[in-house]
Image (cartoon, rainbow, N blue to C red):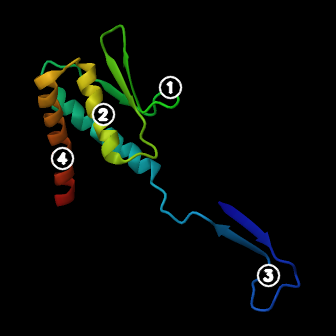
Amino acid sequence: MREINEKSQEGQEGEPQGMRVIHGDNRPQESRTGRCLAFAEAARQLGMAVRGQELVVPSFRSPPREVGRRRTLARHGDGSVTVSVMVRNRIWEAVLADMIEGVVAANQLDGIDAEVLRDQLWESLEGESARREAA
């Protein structure tokens, strides 16, 4: 919430003259650029983890075109798949989980195959986080 109060020239002593701006929400705003870069890096890591396994490597985009959806999947005529994930105003782990589920869905896996792939994908993302923290 933002409030703007104008003080008159005959303001009370000790109060500043002129315009005073009060910003209501003091919570830190998440960096859109930082989130975009993290999303791109996660997509790159997931792609690297899937390549060489005879699996579909989907492309990722954000946000989904369908309003109100957190994750969508689009299959194209050439066999490619696009996973769209909502990034803004969400917990980062939920975004990563949607990206991983998008890879599983793109490859139409279920059962033990899906579980194994999920574990591999989480490990690929955790490995990158560990390397970043060590640097």
Q: Amino acid at mark 3?
A: Gln
Which residue is at 32% across, 34% downward? Answer: 98
Residue bearing mark 1: 66
The residue furthest front is 111
Q: Secondary structure at mark 3?
A: loop
Mark 1 or mark 3, which has the lower sequence index? Answer: 3
Q: Marks 4 and 2, Cα distance to the nearest angstrom?
A: 14 Å
Would you name the residue on which mark 3 appears? 17
Q: Earlier in the sequence, mark 1 or mark 4?
A: 1
Dot 1 or dot 2, earlier in sequence: 1
Marks 4 and 3 in Cβ contact (< 8 Å): no
Residue 86 lies left or right of residue 106; in this view the side is right
Residue pictured at 39% horizontal, 47% vertical: 35
**Which residue is at 41% across, 41% downward?**
87
Q: Residues within 10 Å of mark 3 (few under 14, many from 20)?
A: some
Few, some or many residues within 10 Å of mark 2 (<14, 14–19, 20+) = many
Q: Mark 4 highlights which residue?
A: 126
**Residue type beneath disc 1:** Glu
Q: Amino acid at mark 2?
A: Met
Would residue 52 be seen by someone viewing this image from the given angle? no
Q: How many marks?
A: 4
Q: Are marks 1 and 4 in contact (CB under 8 Å)?
A: no
Relative vertical location of residue 44 with respect to residue 129 in this rendering, above or below: above
Secondary structure category for the residue under label 4? helix
**Residue hosting label 2:** 99
What is the distance, in whole Å, between disc 1 and disc 3 at their CAs?
49 Å
